[in-house]
Every structure is written in C-alpha cells, then in structure tokens.
Amino acid sequence: MLLREKDTYVPETVRELILEALQSRRFANVKGVVTELKGKGVPEDVTLRMIKDLANEGKVILNLPGASEDTVMTPVSNIFAYFRSTLAFDLWLTLILLVLGLGTTFLIPVELFPLVILRWVFGGLLLVFIPGFAFVRALFPFERYIDRWERLALSCGLSIAFAVLVGFGLNFTPWGITLVPTATILAVITLVSILVATVRRAQILIAKPTNFTPSDTK
C-alpha cells in the first residue's frame, strides 16, 4: 500500500506497515524501517512516533541490550518460537557442524578415500572453529560489542587454545591424547556453550518488551 503526501496517515495502517517490515527478518535497524516506509509515502516523524508507540505497547522491542544500536524487533513469544526463528540460525548451524564433525571423525576411516575428505573438513572445523565459535557466542550473544571479523578471529583462536589445553590435560590421563576423548571433550565444550548462548539470548528476546526503555531516535 502506497501512501501519498495528501493522504491521511491512519495509525493502524502505519502500524501494519511497520510490523510487516519486521515480520520477515524480525531484526532491523530503526533507520532501515524509516527508509522502507518512506518509500511507501510515510513521513519519517510519523514512522518514528509509531515505532515508539508500538514499543510502549509491547508490540516491538527497541534498543535490544547487546545488539547493535537502534535495533527494533518483534518480540519472541516463547522458547519454541525462538528456535523456529532466524535468530537461532547460527546456533542451529553450529550444532549441525558439530554433529557432522563427530560423525565424520568417528565413522569414516582414514583409509576410505575420497570420503575421508569429509572427515578432514568437518573434523578440522571441530578442531579449529566450532568450539570457539560457540564459546564466543555464549560470551557475546549479540553483535553490539564485537563484529563478524573479530568473532571469526576469536573463534579460531579459542578453538585452537581449547584443543591445546584438552591435549595437555589428556596427556596426564590414562587415555592419553587420542581421538575419542579429545573429540568428546571439544563436543562437550561446544554443547555447554550453545546452551549458555541460548539461555542468554532467550532471557532477553522472550522478556517482556516493556522492560526495555525506548530511547529517542534521531
């Protein structure tokens, strides 16, 4: 629906346009929503005022703690809605990569070429990326304080550090530095990190939006 300058801006219509803009991606930037609605003929001040009204009513969350500045999003109703949303995509991806890493490492023998290439790839990710990525996500559930390149560098660095520490610790056990205990401990670190990240995110995303005080948006 396009609104022209001469039209009367019906609050319900603008509300629907804002919620529609957030429906597909759930996360957005206030300026992005303003720009999108401006293309449909809604003045900036009308959009900003309606976003604040929606925040006060609990329909959207403004300035999500830990996320990038001036975020606006529709709230998640419960943990199941969170898991079905795109917000949990990276955690699902981490879990899938973990399963592939363990599966290829334990089930594909080194002599079985070319399937062993899958073992090299996913087993390598388990060693140098997956545990660190999950741990960093647990430390920083959202993007405000760390960008994607810093997250990638920390993920690789921490994964290698975990592998070294696990190997050092296993050296003093009856198992020694062998495949099964090393992969198992790295998997446990990853799963615990995913659990912590999920809890930290869900506590914020499923919280009542009225707990967040919307700030003035320039």
Image (spheres, rainbow, N blue to C red):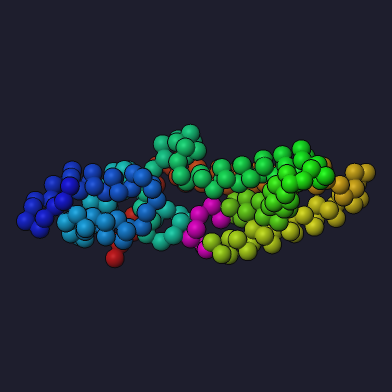
Q: Name the residue: 8% across, 52% down.
A: 7
Q: Main secondary structure of the magenta part?
A: loop
199 and 35: which one is in front? 35
Q: Name the residue: 54% across, 48% down.
A: 90
Q: Which percent across, then down, holds residue 155?
A: 64, 58
201 and 28: which one is in front? 28
42 and 99: which one is in front? 99
Q: Name the residue: 34% across, 44% down.
A: 23
Residue 144 falls within the magenta-colored stretch? yes
Q: Is residue 121 visible?
A: yes
108 and 190: which one is in front? 108
Residue 113 falls within the magenta-colored stretch? no
Question: As displayed, is residue 173 above or below residue 149?
Answer: above
Q: Name the residue: 42% across, 40% down.
A: 76
Range of residues picked out in magenta: 140-147
Q: Farthest front residue? A: 114
Q: Quadrant of residue 192?
A: top right
Image quadrant occupied by the C terminus: bottom left
